[in-house]
Image (cartoon, rainbow, N blue to C red):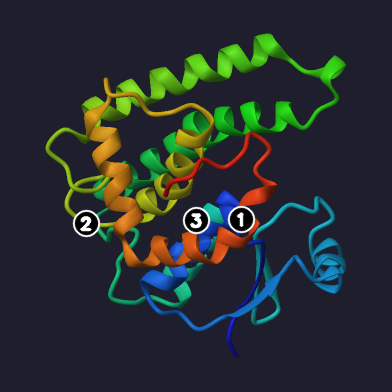
Amino acid sequence: MTPTLYAHPFSSYCQKVLIALYENGTPFEYRTLEDARNGTELEALWPIKRFPVLVDDGRTVMEATIIIEHLCLHYPGLARLIPDDPREALAVRLLDRFFDNYVATPMQKIVLDRIRPEPDRDSYGVKEARAMLDRAYGWLDRTLAGREWAAGRTFSLADCAAAPSLFYADWAHPVGEAFPHVRDYRRRLLARPSFARAVDEARPYRGYFPLGAPDRD
């Protein structure tokens, strides 16, 4: 049996899992949430109604990082997204949390604020989110100096997290010229075949981006 993924192509966290699947050519059934029936199935599996969700051999697996951990355990391939060495794996997991918490989260704060009714918008919160992104870009720029990928020479879980996070973060709060290592890293991620595929699959949905998708990438 192949695992079933409930996801939407335009979702950053869904893209994170898709990258992992594409890196190893893992067969899976893709149930996109454009189909209302798949949304009903998702709600029955996970009442929180957040995606992605993976169903594998009767087990329901939630949260993008945990799904990738599950895939690494049960569907290992040539791409070792989590190193066997526990110390190296710890560094990868740290960066995974960095991209989710300090890039994706403030990016989503900016984006979601735009779809609120104007009287309910949180200008102070958006200002804080932009400041957080600048701090994150600064730390990441120093960290990436001399590295090809987030945790070193090998593409990993950390890069699966980084790719969609930085992709959309740059749309919401551009990575400035003061962060050349981050800008170069983002370009390398976009050139990675697994992420390029996820980006292409999401192109038809760019009109959904509340801030207006830039005419690039």
Q: Is residue 72 left or right of residue 152?
A: right
Label placed on residue 53: none
- Position of the N terminus, as image quadrant, is bottom right
Q: Using a 10 Å C-alpha cutoff, classify the residue at mark 2 as few (fewer than 14 neighbours), some (14 to 19) or many (20 or more).
A: some
The residue tagged 3 is: 16
Of circles 1 and 3, which is in front?
1
What is the three-letter code of the residue carrying label 3?
A: Lys
Label placed on residue 154: 2
Residue at 34 percent across and 67 percent down: it is: 193
User: Mark 2: which secondary structure?
Assistant: loop
User: Mark 3: which secondary structure?
Assistant: helix
Determine whether 97 is above or below 121 in the image. Answer: below
Image quadrant of residue 145? top left
Q: Is residue 175 visible?
A: yes
Cα gap from disc 1 to disc 3, whole angstroms: 11 Å
Q: Which residue is nearer to you in this view: 95 or 180?
A: 180
Residue at 31 percent across and 61 percent down: it is: 192
Q: Which residue is nearer to you in this view: 16 or 94?
A: 16
